[in-house]
Amino acid sequence: MHDEALLIATVAMAFVLAFGFGFLAYHLRLPPLVGYLVAGIAIGPFTPGFVADGGLAGQLAEMGVILLMFGVGLHFSAADLMAVRWIAIPGAIGQIALATLVGTGLALAWGWSLGAGLILGLSLSVASTVVLLRALEDRNAVATPNGRIAVGWLIVEDLAMVLALVLLPAIGEMLGGHADTHGAGAEGSLLVSVAITLVKVAAFVTLAILLGPKLVPWLLKQVARTGSRELFTLSVLAVAMGIAFGSAKLFGVSFALGAFFAGVVLSESRFSHRAAADSLPLQDAFAILFFVSVGMLFDPSILIREPLAVAAVLLLIILGKSVFAFVIVILMGYPKSTALTVSASLAQIGEFSFILAGLGVSMGLLPGEGRDLILAGALFSITLNPLVFSAVDKALAKLRPGTYGEKRLAGLQAQLTSLRQRMEAREAEHSLQIQNLVDLFPIFADLDHQAREDLLMLFRPRSATPGQRVIRKGDRPDAAYFISKGTVQVSVGDRLIPLGPGDFFGEMALLSGARRSADVTATDYCQFLTLDQREFRSFVARNPRLREQLDALAAQRSAMNRDRPEAAPVPTI
Ligand code: CMP
């Protein structure tokens, strides 16, 4: 097969089978993700029939990781994390430490190296964001305090894993691996290479934090002004992929970290909702390819070769981690309901475990069998997760209402509510602005929400004092004026036409391409919203209904100016 046909075949088979198995999984009341993994197994080298290209699938999977991490960054809210930090940070770190310890112990008992044990332990300790968010969404629990705690906990886990991914290549050699492929300090002592890695990461993070929030929103604003949806989506992708790739090349940090920060930088901008919505389909598509390519790596014979090891891994993921999480949450003073929800949320492993396992194998640290175990653990724990949740639901129903921890939970609830109220107030202010715009200028009533938002962004405020000539007849046009406060007077010959709030002027020359047709003078302290000529023209071109209305009004105005005053009857005395 030609190379290009190979890519098409791989992607086509991946999508077709992922859809088929995903759909089936849905009907079996399993997460579709299980279907994607099974699709991967079906086109993988360990099962008969079509075998997709592993190398290509790997690269597509890397794209998936970049976009997934970008999505995690985009949804990252520092404020939310701060609200639950007292439980999420110690909880996540405690749980990672305990699970890693037990995982390492297991591996050592099997006669693996310490490095292999650490990677196994870390991989088993971190849950999947994708699985968790879907589980919480299914139960409508993302915004509840328990849901917030679980999400915050997971973000801390993700951050810890990002750090582990960055440091692993640097300390891999000490753990018995060979030099990594990303080129972090193969020479010099361990300390030096760790230090160099950390300095590079710090330089990258500083740059991302200092420059990013200025540069990226500015760029998006310029693109949003063009009014082209396509260019906007493209700019979001260019930012995500560009930062991920550039930071990997320039700073030697992982694609994942670069993409995560690209998302964080964007999440602070006013366009974050739109960016998230626009990039979501692509994120979904590549995340699916990621799960399929993970499935491809899975060798199902592990279930026969090492059934006990698979059972041990599964037990650690579902029972071990849940018990750790439960105990930690109770120790932190929260009620049993919180402890149970958090435990169920985290009783699975996912994308980070695959990434860690992949890196471990490529560095020669983790035996192939280790990856198979991790994949088996992921496959089963994700499949069983809905069952774990329903068991928790049953336990919650039976739970007698106690008082332990309730006060603390109520405190958190109050804090989260006030946080949400503040955010909602900010959004309400924005929509109020939009509403005001339409209330004030009826001409915009037919525009859709997106166009109104664009308009708010394009408007430049200007003001004028009484007597100031705003437009001079015969000049070249520069902008159109929408009066938000005060009054002006249009002079056509002897006739004076007053205009006030809600009216507009200066549109005629812009529409016709001619010079200004009249003088316009402020008769009060005025505030205008102006659209400069380029933006006026492109906005009107994008909104044909508005163009019609403006044309009709301009025609009326010029007709009125044509049959002018000389003809006015002279009053008889
Ligand atoms: P323009 O020709 O660009 O600059 C002068 C503006 O005065 C013109 O656009 C209209 O917006 C406004 N104008 C001209 N004639 C009238 C009219 N008869 N009634 C109201 N406004 C007018």
Image (cartoon, rainbow, N blue to C red):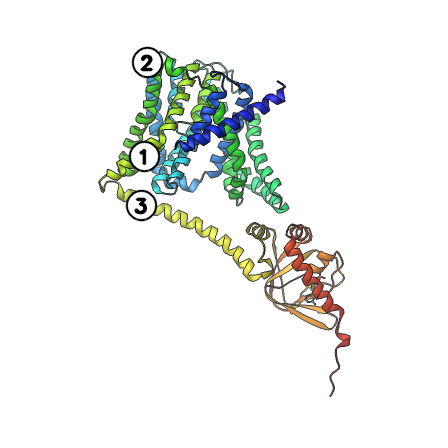
At x 57% / y 23%, what residue is drawn? 9
Residue 390, label in figure: 1
In this orientation, which residue lies closer to the viewer: 487 or 326? Answer: 326
Give the residue type that dot 1 points to.
Ser
Above or below, comparing residue 299 to residue 504 in the picture: above
Residue mark closest to the camera, 3 vs 2: 2
Disc 2 target residue: 109
Where residue 28 sits: x, y (%)? 39, 31
The local secondary structure at tag 1 comes to helix
Image quadrant holding the C terminus, namely bottom right
Residue mark closest to the camera, 3 vs 1: 1
In this orientation, which residue lies closer to the viewer: 452 or 406? Answer: 452
The local secondary structure at tag 2 comes to helix
C-alpha distance separating marks 3 and 2: 44 Å
- Quarter for ligand 1? bottom right
Crowding at mark 1 (Cα within 10 Å: few <14, some 14-19, many 20+): few
User: Which is more N-terminal, label 2 or label 3?
Assistant: 2
Where residue 409 sits: x, y (%)? 30, 42
Crowding at mark 3 (Cα within 10 Å: few <14, some 14-19, many 20+): few
Crowding at mark 2 (Cα within 10 Å: few <14, some 14-19, many 20+): few
Residue 87, label in figure: none
Disc 3 target residue: 411
In this orientation, which residue lies closer to the viewer: 103 or 234? Answer: 234
Side of 287 relative to 573 (left or right): left
At x 33% / y 19%, what residue is drawn? 311
The reply to whether the C-beta atoms of the residues labelled 3 and 2 are less than 8 Å apart is no
